[in-house]
Image (cartoon, rainbow, N blue to C red):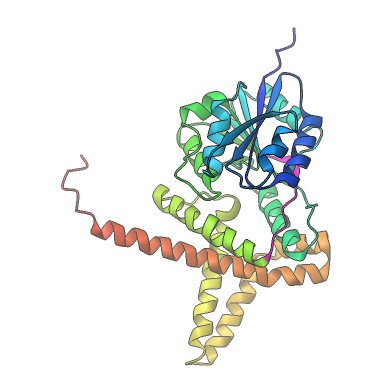
């Protein structure tokens, strides 16, 4: 006898994005297996997203005000019937076999509570920043540990039982880091998470230089640094792997030596050497960019990822100082540890 199919709920939060939503839901319908449902959560959109969603032939839930991704996903989960919650961003297009592969994974690997994938190497937007940003995400996810220490809700699924144990997404997170925070809590609770590198989806979003900096610094680097400080550990994986941390340190040192070069010019040589060492440390990334888009593209990406390390380091220093100031302001605990 064959095991009964697992009922999966496909949950798509959306805010002011009707065009991408249509393509996202169309792909999900093509990939939708039996014993499943599609739930769109309209997160207080102020345009015609809600009415467009209503015409797509799926379940649509409406939030009166924009509450953020965490609240929207939780709201979808509360109204879902599936044993698996499969979260998909509204600007993502799945492959025809994506959902089947996720369901099959959970059927065959009961020891895992969650699974997530990555963007593929062919984003829809063709401008340079979008291509770079998407490929960077793909690179880190493809080289991440299969036994993951975090989670990604752009294309990620969780067993309902595990989701309920950790009380879902933390709605206090108003940035797009609520999925990473959820992953940390899942791991802390003893659940296993799988990064399935072959589970790849197409990203539709068009990035600009400004939106990239704003997202990376405000919505990712700062809250991720706070998560690290609160957890008091660096998981050696994805964007906080050892190589990435060393790169951040090198770039900050290079900037310090560059500024010091205004007073003592020989420091400029040291700054150049440190930056060169950072490039060499990340040479596999340069080679990856070259293989995907050619020499000019790879050369253009070098200053962007050096900048990425720079503002990531600045964000961590800001948060580190915040925690130092807060800890100094707290009264000393007189209770013995024994």
Q: Position of residue 23 (x, y in %)?
A: 78, 41
Check if residue 320 falls in the magenta segment: no
* Quarter occupied by the N terminus: top right
Q: 209 or 118: which is nearer to us?
A: 209
In the image, what residue occupies the spot 66% across and 64% down?
282
Q: Is residue 253 above or below residue 154?
A: below
Whether residue 16 sits left or right of residue 253 in the image: it is right
Residue 146 vertical position relative to residue 125 in the rendered view, above or below: above
Give percent across and percent down for residue 275.
61, 75
| Residue at x-position 52% and y-position 43% | 67
Q: Position of residue 271 (x, y in %)?
A: 56, 81
Bounds of the magenta span?
195-208
Residue at image point 44% right, 44% down: 172
Residue at the image position 69 percent from the left and 70 percent from the top: 302
Q: Is residue 45 above or below residue 115?
A: below
Q: For this view, does 228 lie left or right of residue 41? A: left
In this rendering, would 188 be left or right of 107?
left
Assess whether residue 201 is covered by the magenta stretch.
yes
Residue furthest toward the top?
Answer: 1
> Which quadrant of the figure has residue 304?
bottom right
Front-most of 47 and 123?
Answer: 47
**Is residue 311 visible in the rendered structure shown here?**
yes
The secondary structure that dominates the magenta segment is strand
């Amino acid at each position: 006898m064959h095991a009964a199919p697992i009922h999966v709920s496909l949950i798509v939060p959306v805010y002011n994005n009707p065009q991408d939503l249509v393509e996202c839901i169309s792909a999900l319908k093509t990939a939708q297996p039996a014993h499943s449902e599609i739930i769109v959560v309209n997160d207080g959109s102020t345009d015609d997203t809600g009415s467009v969603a209503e015409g797509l032939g799926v379940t649509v839930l409406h939030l009166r005000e924009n509450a953020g991704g965490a609240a929207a996903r939780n709201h979808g989960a509360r109204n879902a019937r599936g044993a698996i919650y499969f979260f998909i961003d509204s600007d993502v297009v799945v492959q025809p076999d994506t959902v089947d592969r996720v369901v099959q994974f959970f059927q065959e690997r009961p020891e895992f509570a969650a699974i997530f994938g990555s963007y593929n190497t062919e984003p829809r937007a063709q401008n340079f920043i979008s291509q770079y940003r998407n490929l960077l995400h793909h690179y880190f996810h493809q080289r991440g540990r299969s036994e993951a220490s975090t989670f990604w809700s752009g294309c990620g699924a969780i067993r309902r039982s595990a989701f309920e144990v950790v009380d879902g997404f933390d709605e206090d997170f108003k940035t797009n880091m609520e999925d990473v925070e959820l992953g940390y809590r899942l791991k802390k609770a003893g659940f296993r998470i799988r990064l399935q590198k072959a589970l790849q989806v197409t990203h539709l979003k068009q990035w600009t230089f400004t939106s990239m900096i704003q997202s990376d610094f405000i919505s990712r680097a700062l809250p991720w640094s706070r998560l690290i400080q609160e957890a008091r550990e660096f998981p050696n994986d994805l964007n906080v792997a050892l190589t990435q941390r060393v790169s951040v340190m090198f770039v900050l040192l290079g900037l310090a030596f560059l500024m010091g070069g205004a007073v003592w010019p020989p420091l400029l040589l040291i700054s150049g050497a440190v930056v060169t060492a950072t490039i060499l440390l990340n040479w596999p990334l340069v080679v990856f960019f070259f293989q995907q888009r050619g020499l000019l593209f790879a050369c253009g990406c070098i200053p962007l990822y050096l900048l990425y390390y720079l503002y990531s380091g600045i964000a961590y220093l800001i948060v580190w100082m915040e925690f130092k100031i807060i800890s100094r302001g707290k009264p000393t605990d007189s209770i013995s540890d024994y």
